[in-house]
């Protein structure tokens, strides 16, 4: 009887060892990480367009403030850009396409849809390196992956 009870545990561990359950979890986590910017943008766009359908309210801003870091020189700068206009930082061309923020009576959150193009130093056509939503409270959800520069959203506001 004791041997019969141990057998399922042995079979279960053999199945896990053969199927590579750890790699399944890694693939699942990678898929979720890849879908996160899309899901965040979908829910943000839905709540902005639906108005006060949910508990959160978004106010459209017309200007965004970003913090830019040059990883080579460790220089930190603040970049302000109106919606629809391009600003430059190093070799990056940063365009704010949309900007939204919570009203003061709700938990603070800012979100911006930005497009970043790298002009490089060679004079060739700029290459798009990022396009998506970024959030001030969670900069790692959707981050610019660039070897030299980092961008973080500080605030969106209406003038």
Image (tube, rainbow, N blue to C red):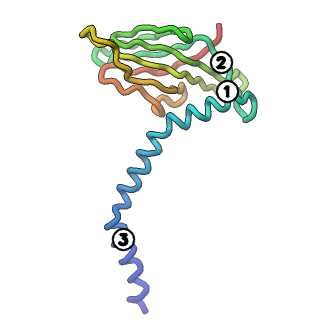
Q: Residue lying furthest front in this view? A: 125
Asked whether the residues under the numbered discs 2 and 1 touch, taking CB atoms below 8 Å apart as contact, a structural biologist would say: yes
Q: Nearer the viewer, residue 39 or 4?
A: 39
Instruction: Write the residue at 58% across / 11% down.
Output: 63
Label at residue 48 = 1
Q: Quadrant of the N terminus?
A: bottom left
Q: Position of residue 91 (x, y in %)?
A: 33, 11
Residue 83 higher or lower than 113, as above or below: above
Secondary structure beneath dot 1 equals: helix
Specify which label sits upstream in the sequence, 3 or 2.
3
Label at residue 15 = 3
Secondary structure beneath dot 2 equals: strand
Q: Residues within 10 Å of mark 2 (few under 14, many from 20)?
A: some
Q: Nearer the viewer, residue 139 or 39?
A: 39
- Quadrant of res 102: top right
Q: Position of residue 117 (x, y in %)?
A: 39, 17
Instruction: Write the residue at 43% across / 28% down.
Output: 143
Residue 93 as seen in the image, left or right of residue 85:
left
Mark 2, residue position: 60
Q: Quadrant of the C terminus?
A: top right
């Amino acid at each position: 009887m004791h041997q019969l009870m141990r057998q399922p545990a042995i079979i279960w561990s053999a199945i896990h060892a053969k199927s590579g359950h750890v790699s399944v979890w890694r693939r699942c986590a990678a898929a979720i990480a890849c879908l996160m910017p899309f899901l965040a943008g979908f829910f943000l766009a839905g709540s902005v367009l639906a108005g006060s359908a949910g508990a959160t309210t978004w106010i459209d801003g017309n200007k965004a403030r970003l913090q830019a870091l040059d990883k080579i020189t460790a220089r930190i700068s603040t970049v302000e850009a109106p919606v629809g206009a391009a600003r430059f930082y190093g070799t990056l061309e940063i365009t704010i396409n949309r900007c939204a923020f919570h009203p003061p009576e709700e938990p603070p959150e800012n979100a911006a849809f930005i497009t970043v193009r790298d002009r490089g130093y060679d004079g060739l056509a700029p290459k798009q390196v990022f396009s998506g939503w970024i959030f001030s409270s969670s900069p790692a959800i959707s981050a610019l992956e660039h070897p030299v520069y980092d961008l973080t959203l500080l605030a969106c506001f209406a003038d």
